[in-house]
Structures are given as structure tokens and as C-alpha cells.
Amino acid sequence: MNKMLHLVNKSSFERNALDSCLRLAKTGSSVLLIEDGVYAAMSKAVSAESVNKRMQDLNFFVLGPDITARGLEDTPLIPGIQVVDYAGFVDLVVEHDVTQSWL
Amino acid sequence: MEVLDEQQPDIVKRFMYVNRRAPYGTIYALECLEVVLTAAAFDQDVSLVFVDDGVFQLKKNQAPAAIGMKNFSKTFRALGDYDVEKIYVELESLEKRGLTADDLIIPVEVVTTTDLREIMAQQDVVISS
Amino acid sequence: MLDNGIVDDTLYEADIMKIGILVNEGPFTHQASDSAYRFAEAAIAKGHEITRVFFYNDGVFNANKLSAPQTDDRNGVALWAGLAEANEIDLVICITAALRRGIKNEILTGGFRISGLGQLIESGITNDRLVVFGD
């Protein structure tokens, strides 16, 4: 089995990309939220529920610069989500065998 | 970058093309199919997956002449000629849309979400459109 | 919760990878091209090789030398061309997608070339990683 990194770049209020990703992501894989996808990291948004459901078996990351850009630096994020920068994004791509983008 | 040539041992990777969008409203369905057809020349291990609105790409009886567009759905029937035989459609995506395999233009392998998770996890390259 | 198998930084710094990128959207309308650029830049800074960036769908617009953004804004086209020249990145736009959208050789920015979809498949085959940026 190949270890997969899932990229989600859309708000879960706009698209079902995150929902579909969470439905199909295999245990042990990772999800990196980028671009508008970072809104799903907000702990007080209703979208947090679906992320929390898979917090125990998936690794969640969010791209810091996209958080900063959108004014979310002081917004509480879901506990367990790690903030990474672009260098961290690269590391995630390298350490996972495959990257799949949910557009 | 390095170019494939006859001297290199043949690399065969598992390529998966993921379709999640309906046809005609955007160009992604058509342009993804164009990639799949081109890819045939490279003798890789290809799978095509239809999830969410992607299942609509396979709906029978499309007549896009009504909106001045080409009916590319017929091309799905030629996939066998291009050695693309692994065509998966997610059961849940069909059911949510009130469709069954009988509504589709080609025979496909309808898979559960659980099975599709496993299939996706086996791929080497995933191209999303 | 982290999988402990992914922690050793030393291992990864020695592990130089060849990475291919696919960009499915044009400059400005979507963030895809910006994200891809910043990813590419970061990968190069870490010592990895970005071998090829393939532009498909509206991504072909990233090659358009006629793009004239406001002077206080980033110029995506120029950024790609500059990054490619400095790091020997092969920037390829798909011929079919380009023709549809009126992107021809005469308006191509230096550093970009027009070629077929086979270049994308080749990128997937010969690179260690392929990352897709789209809408």
C-alpha cells in the first residue's frame, strides 16, 4: 500500500471535496488543507465535526500562509491539526508515496 | 528532465484518473478523457474512477448538440481499445444521485466506498481533474 | 496524531526527489498557479528537483506574455519564467488546451514550450512525485 497525502483546496461550504476526501481517505493517510480549504481547520465551524470524526486515524495539516492570508491566525483551530509552511508542504509530499488532490 | 527512452527498463506505474465533476458545465470531464486516451500509448496500469458528480459523465443518452457541444460520452465506449479496463464507479455516488449501473453508457465496476478506499491506496500516481 | 515513521529530518534532507507538477488553472482567477509556484520554490530551496511543470486546462494561460497585471501585484507569468530559467525547469503547456484557448507560440513567454499530453504522463512515470494544483 502506498501512503497517501490528500490535498484539499476548497472550503467545505463551497464544495464537497473535503467530505469526499474524508470518505475515501484510508487510515494512516494524511490530509493537508490549502488555499480556501484552510477554513475547514476552524474549530468553531460546523465543518469541524467531519474532521474530528477522522482525527484519530488520519493526520491533519493546514498550510500556515493560507491561514495568515485569510485572517485566521488568531482563530482557534481544531486541536490536533498541525500548521505547516510551504517547506513543510514539500516535506509532506516527499514523505508520502503519493499525493492526491481533491479539487 | 529525463526522457523515457528505449534504454530504460520499462517503468509501469499505477495511474488513477479521478473524475468528480459533471460533464458540459465545465471542460474538466472532456479534457481528463483526452489525457486518458493519450496515456494509452505509455502502457501504464490505468484506472479510471468516477465519484460524486463524476458519475454523471457516464449517464446514457447524452445529447449535447442541444447546447452546441460535442458528445464525448461516446468515447467512453472506446476505452477498451485503449486498454483501459479498470473503470470504477462509487456505489454511494450513484445511489445519492438516484442512479444505478443500468443508467450508465458502459459496463463498469461499481465499488463500495470501502473498496474504493483500498483501490485508491494502491495507486502510484493520481491525476485529478 | 503523527505516524512516527515520518519524523527523521536528516533522512529527508539527503533524500533528494524529482518532483513533477501539474497546474490546471490560469494565473489570477484561481490560487492554483500561485500555490504551485510557492510549492516549487520551497521544494527547490530544500534541494529537490522540480523537473517539469505541465500546464493543462486554463493552466496554459500561465504562458501568456501579454499578461499585464497591476504593477503592485505579482506577475505570475514572469515568476514562472524566472524560476524555470534559474532552475532548469521544463515548462510545458498542452497543445490541445492551448489551441482551444488561443495560446500560440507568438504569445508564449520565454521558457515555456508547447507540447503534447504525453509530457504529462512522462512526468508521472519518471518523477518520484507528481503534485496537482487545480480549482
Image (spheres, grey):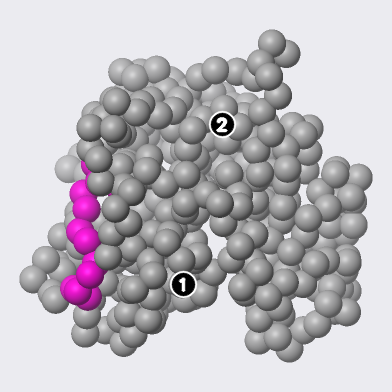
Of C59 and C104, which appears nearest the observer?
Answer: C59
Q: Which of these two is toward me, C38 or C109? A: C38
Q: Is residue A30 magenta?
A: no
Query: Residue C118: where, in percent of width, then height?
Result: 67, 31
**Helix, strand, or loop for circle 2?**
helix
Three-letter code for the amino acid on which mark 2 is drawn: Ser
In the image, what residue occupies the spot 64% across and 67% down? B116
Question: Which one is nearer the viewer's eye here, C85 or C6?
Answer: C6
Which label sits on residue A102? none
Magenta-colored span = A77-89
For disc 2, the neighbor class at 10 Å (few under 14, some 14 to 19, many from 20) is many
Check disc 1 and give the amino acid type: Leu
Residue at 52% over, 49% down: A2
Q: In front: mark 1 or mark 2?
A: 1
- Residue B12 visible to the viewer: yes
Q: Is residue C60 left or right of residue C41?
A: right
Which residue in the protein does label 2 denote? C123
Residue reaching furthest left? Answer: A74
Please say if C108 is above or below C129: above
Marks 1 & 2, CB-CB < 8 Å contact: no
Residue corresponding to mark 1: A22
Q: How far, Cα to Cα, is label 1 from label 2?
A: 28 Å
Disc 1 chain ID: A
Residue A87 on the magenta segment:
yes
* Picture quarter with the C terminus of chain B: bottom right
